Image (cartoon, grey):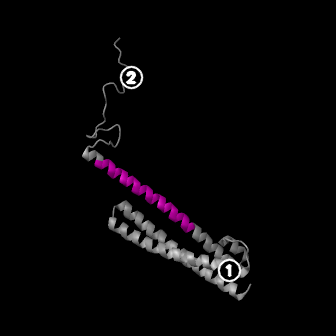
Amino acid sequence: MSEQIRKLYQSLCQTIGEEVELYEKMVQEMKNKQRAIIDGKIDEMKKAIFRERELSQSVMNHVKKRIGLTFSIKNEMGIQQEDVTLKQLLSHADPDHATLLEGLRYRLKSNVYQISKINRENKYLLSASIEHVHGLINLFLKDDSKTDIRYEGTGLISRPADEHRVLDFQI
């Protein structure tokens, strides 16, 4: 392996390492946002969203750099495939870089999984909260849209005279 390719692999490892650290910070910010959603602390949630956006921008910059380094390694090594994945580059790397890249790849996948999971949880929390507030508004304003078909605007269960009648025979 040439010295140029070795330097490119070293830069790739450093870039992916920085990207992994950014993802780990993003996971922490998303957890902070989740706590703010649960606690109803709107200002903290807004701050967490702002920090999350900043981290996302930094991640995107690192992704561009990583793609550029991957392309450079592909060209230097004469790999014919148009799109080369990190897994494919592992097979061409020297043992030291391959081991390091494999560990970084695992951490990267783990962080992306955590981010997806937290996003699903946050989406559920927010939609449930919005649904609850919508139901309360409908209940208090007593408009025509009902929160639940079984309840009236007073909160009492409505029972028409013929509903739930099993037997009404005179013997």
Q: Nearer the viewer, residue 45 or 168?
A: 45
In which quarter of the view is residue 1 placed?
bottom right
Please tell me whether residue 168 is drawn above or below residue 71 in the rendered image.
above
For residue 133, above or below residue 6: above
Check if residue 98 falls in the magenta segment. no
Kindly identify which numbered label has been placed on residue 166.
Answer: 2
| Predominant SS of the magenta segment | helix
User: Dividing the image into 4 quarters, which one contains the C terminus?
Assistant: top left
**What amino acid type is highlighted by mark number 2?**
Val
Q: Position of residue 137 (x, y in %)?
A: 29, 49
Q: Is residue 101 above or below residue 133?
A: below
Q: How many residues crowd mark 1 within 10 Å: few (<14), some (14–19), many (20+)?
A: many
Q: Where is residue 100 drawn, in percent x and y?
A: 64, 77
Q: Determine if the magenta segment contains residue 131.
A: yes
Which of pointers 1 and 2 lies earlier in the amino acid sequence? 1
| Residue at numbered disc 1 | 73
Nearer to us: label 1 or label 2: 1
Q: Residue furthest bottom?
A: 3
User: Helix, strand, or loop for circle 1?
Assistant: helix
Residue at 38% from the left image edge and 60% from the top image edge = 38
Residue visible at 48% across and 69% down?
27
Q: Which mark is residue 8?
A: none
Q: Residue at x 44, y 58 (%)?
A: 123
What residue range appears in magenta? 110-137
